[in-house]
Image: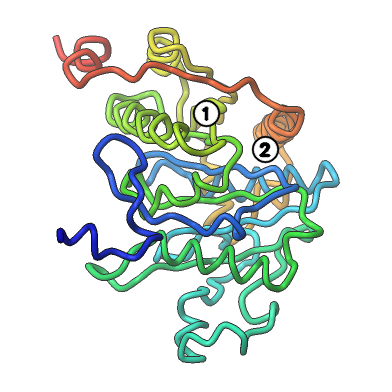
């Protein structure tokens, strides 16, 4: 008997070519809510994008829940104004007896009523992020916290495409990729597209498109999208006001309005409305490494 044969059923099924992934119990799937997973290269601004998108959805009158899926647990920092405790830390305090937890132990209210949860992660080099995501969703369902939620946003660690941090894709309707107008960001986006395509073989998740962030121009992003059959959904320029909003622990909707801030707020509202109205499922054809270097790279 191979080690795979000895694995618990939740770990055994193939999910994508040659991969073994952490599978969620079908009873723990999120239903009746629009679910988005936000991915992108590490440091590209996923948490800033996710939090302002959550705020924009709330401005549209939607009931929003944001789930941070990074051990750094700063996804909801600008929504709550603080680093809130993680689900994994709270579970440790009760010796992993989830029945002892109350919603207020791990769900915190942020700007304009956005509910905020930080899943956290296992200690470095141990465990699997997929387990943490699964336990977080299970707790939310057990306490019926998804019953009065219109939108769930998963903000996912870096450009990791392993089974653990691909776990939010098992719940998501659409995956959104944050990128910038440079080679490294677009290369990471290309890999994430391949990971989502693999997940879409067995789950409902489909790609929605990408958001160009921290970029004055979008020519390289647009050239890549035209080549592989992908869509740029929004453009968020490289503004110092966005950096300052994070330093002030605020969303952009709480900053003193000037022309730049008002324009970016409008772009987030437009993006939220577009996602709420529904996007066509994208099925881009990711490039091989050599091809993406030849498209974007080095003469």
In the rendered image, the quadrant that contains the N terminus is bottom left
**Secondary structure of the residue carrying numbered label 1:** strand
* Residue under the image location 81 percent in, 45 percent down: 59
**How packed is label 2: few (under 14 Cα within 10 Å), some, or many (20 or more)?**
some
Placement of 201 over or under 253, stated as above or below: above
Q: How much space separates mark 2 and mark 1, taking CA atoms? A: 28 Å
The earlier-in-sequence mark between 2 and 1 is 1
* Residue under the image location 22 percent in, 13 percent down: 291
Q: Is residue 42 visible?
A: no
Q: What residue is disc 1 on?
A: 207
In-front residue for pair 12/225: 12
Could you say where residue 255 lies in the image, as x and y percent from the top left? 69, 50
* Residue under the image location 65 percent in, 60 percent down: 79
* Residue under the image location 38 percent in, 56 percent down: 22
- Label disc, if present, on residue 58 of the rendered structure: none
**Secondary structure of the residue carrying numbered label 2:** helix
Placement of 129 over or under 104, stated as above or below: above
Q: What residue is disc 2 on?
A: 261
In the rendered image, the quadrant that contains the C terminus is top left
Name the quadrant containing residue 248.
bottom right
Could you say where residue 223 lies in the image, as x and y percent from the top left? 40, 10
Q: In this view, does 12 lie to the left or right of 214?
A: left
In-front residue for pair 7/19: 7
Could you say where residue 149 lies in the image, as x and y percent from the top left? 77, 55
Q: Which mark is in front, 2 or 1?
A: 1
Determine the residue located farthest toward the right in the rendered image. 61
């Amino acid at each position: 008997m191979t080690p795979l044969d000895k694995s618990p059923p939740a770990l055994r099924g193939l999910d994508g070519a040659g991969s073994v992934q952490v599978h969620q119990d079908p009873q723990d799937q999120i239903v009746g809510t629009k679910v988005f997973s936000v991915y992108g290269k590490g440091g590209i601004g996923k948490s800033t994008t996710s939090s302002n998108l959550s705020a924009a959805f709330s401005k549209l009158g939607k009931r929003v829940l944001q789930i941070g899926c990074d051990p750094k647990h700063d996804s909801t920092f600008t929504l709550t104004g603080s680093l809130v405790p993680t689900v994994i830390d709270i579970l440790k305090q009760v010796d992993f007896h989830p029945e002892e937890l109350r919603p207020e132990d791990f769900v915190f209210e942020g700007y304009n009523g956005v509910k905020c949860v930080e899943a956290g992660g296992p200690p470095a080099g141990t465990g699997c992020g997929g387990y943490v995501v699964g336990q977080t969703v299970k707790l939310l369902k057990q306490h019926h916290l998804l019953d009065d939620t219109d939108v769930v946003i998963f903000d996912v660690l870096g450009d990791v495409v392993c089974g653990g941090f691909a776990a939010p894709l098992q719940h998501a309707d659409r995956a959104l990729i944050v990128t910038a107008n440079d080679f490294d960001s677009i290369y990471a986006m290309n890999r994430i597209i391949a990971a989502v395509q693999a997940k879409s073989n067995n789950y409902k998740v489909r790609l929605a498109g990408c958001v160009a962030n921290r970029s004055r121009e979008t020519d390289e992003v647009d050239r890549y999208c035209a080549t592989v059959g992908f869509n740029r959904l929004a453009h968020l320029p490289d503004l110092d006001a966005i950096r300052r909003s994070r330093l002030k622990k605020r969303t952009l909707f709480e900053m003193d309005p000037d022309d730049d801030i008002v324009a970016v707020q409008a772009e987030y509202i437009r993006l939220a409305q577009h996602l709420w109205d529904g996007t066509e499922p994208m099925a881009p054809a990711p490039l091989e490494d050599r091809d993406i270097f030849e498209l974007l790279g080095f003469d």
